[in-house]
Amino acid sequence: QVQLVEAGGGLVQAGGSLRVSCAVSGYTFSRAAMGWFRQAPGKEREFVAAVNWNGGTTYYADSVKGRFTISRVNAKNTVYLQMNSLTPEDTAVYYCAASSYSIPRRAVDEYDYWGQGTQVTVSS
């Protein structure tokens, strides 16, 4: 059974930082591209960042480029999203996802497994 469990969300003031993590089990993590998406109330789920199987290639949404960093530790079956210079517009539920592709993907439908999400709230 594949499980993705996010952790690390919370409430932070604008300009602050937060790191969310996603622990994966029951999946060949070391071969899978991983992604982070987010969904704000009343909006569609949107791509945030993705990383290839070994961490050597990363993609970011323009809205987070230069502020967020995705990384992974294959020995721990864990992917991270470091978020800096947060703004209220970053408030959303953040989801991690695993893809059967080994290279990063940006589309929701290119991911096979999803976590339950973790709430990130940025106050002004």
Image: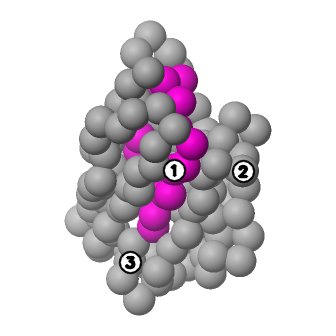
Q: Quadrant of residue 42?
A: top left
The answer to whether one can see residue 90 in this image is no
In the image, which disc is placed on residue 77?
Answer: 3
The residue stretch that appears in magenta: 79-99
Q: Nearer the viewer, residue 82 or 45?
A: 82
Residue drawn 38% across the image and 25% down it: 123
Disc nearest the viewer among 3 and 1:
1
Q: Up-down: is 107 above or below 35?
A: above
Disc nearest the viewer among 2 and 3:
2
Q: Is residue 88 magenta?
A: yes
Q: Earlier in the sequence, mark 3 or mark 1?
A: 3
> Callout 1: few (<14), some (14-19), or many (20+) C-alpha neighbours within 10 Å?
some
Look at mark 1 in the image and give the residue it sits on. 83
Residue 112 x/y as whole percent: 47, 52
Q: Earlier in the sequence, mark 2 or mark 1?
A: 2
Which part of the image, by quadrant, shows the C terminus?
top left
Q: Nearer the viewer, residue 38 or 111?
A: 38
Task: Report the Cα–Cα distance between label 3 and label 1.
Answer: 20 Å
Task: Report the Cα–Cα distance between label 2 and label 1.
Answer: 10 Å
